[in-house]
Image (tube, rainbow, N blue to C red):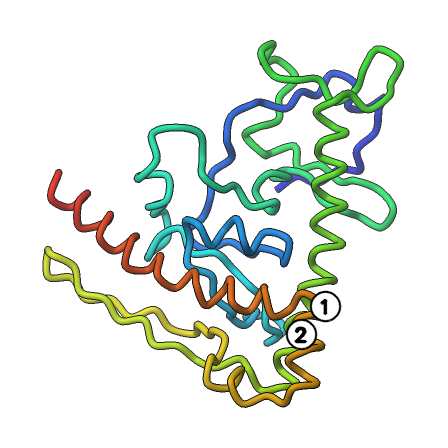
Amino acid sequence: MKLEALDCETHAELRLSRRVPDIPHFVEIVASEFVSAATCCPIFFTKSPETGAFYVGALFGFKPGENLVAAGNSGPPAFIPLDRQRAGFFVSGDHIAVDLDDPRLSSSEQSAEQLFDSDGQPAPALRQIQRQLTALVEGKHETDIFINDLLKLKLIEPIDVSLRFDDGEQMTLEGLYTVSLDGLAEIDDADALRLFRNGHLQLAYAINASLKQVAVLAERRNRLLAEI
């Protein structure tokens, strides 16, 4: 990774490719993405190995390098997390930092979109990145509030995801958590109403509903194995 503060003079010729960025098998997402992600990905809580704090991620595959969501879709990607849409760009204080090693960035690919116009102002491609970074920063804050709300009510619980595939491979996904439906059923009316009004109840149910995508991805993986 080669990070530099983005500057209209230094990076006047820098361009951003239109290609879809690679999506890891597990990607952090923010609250505003839960409903969209739940239509194609299982969503889980997990803990940061660096801080031990919970965050929320969408599962695209069962092991590194695997994207079963893309494998089941011949058209445009069903869901691209904000974290991947902004790939190559980061918030650094009040500025944007750019990773010059990111494969989407180039000064020579003419089909790619310029980041700055002839006046040194942000071009449409960069304005979109700015919006994505803003949504990511604001979304991370909103998601942390949501997580803390559930933790106070003891509504986050571990989940066992054990799978067996047609080729005999067995797999257990560890360190994952979900929303406790039993816990939700036991909260008092005041907390239930508060969760409903602040939108956290909808987010909790979106996470729970997304769990059905585990079976969908597992079936898709079996189908791919049969084609080998």
Residue in the foreground of this view, choosing between 5 and 190: 190
- Name the spot of residue 115 as percent of width and height, x first: 74, 22
- Name the spot of residue 102 as percent of width and height, x first: 58, 34
- Name the spot of residue 215 as percent of width and height, x first: 28, 59
Element type where label 1 sits in the image? loop
Q: Residue at x 46, y 74 (%)?
A: 177
Query: Is residue 152 shown above or below 228?
Result: below
Element type where label 2 sits in the image? helix
Quadrant holding the N terminus: top right
Quadrant holding the C terminus: top left
Left or right, 95 with respect to 56, comes to: right
Q: CA distance from mark 2 to mark 1?
A: 5 Å
Residue in the foreground of this view, choosing between 42 and 14: 42
> Are circles 2 and 1 on residues that touch, CB within 8 Å?
yes
Residue in the foreground of this view, choosing between 30 and 51: 30
Which numbered tag is attached to residue 37?
none
Residue that carries the numbered disc 2 in the rendered image: 195
Rendering quarter of residue 103 = top right
Query: Is residue 183 shown above or below 170?
Result: below
Rendering quarter of residue 192 = bottom right
Q: Residue at x 33, y 60 (%)?
A: 214
Residue that carries the numbered disc 1 in the rendered image: 198
What type is the residue that disc 1 sits on?
Asn
- Name the spot of residue 4 as percent of width and height, x first: 75, 37
What type is the residue that disc 2 sits on?
Leu
Crowd class of label 1 (few under 14; some 14 to 19; many from 20; radius 10 Å): few
Rendering quarter of residue 140 = bottom right
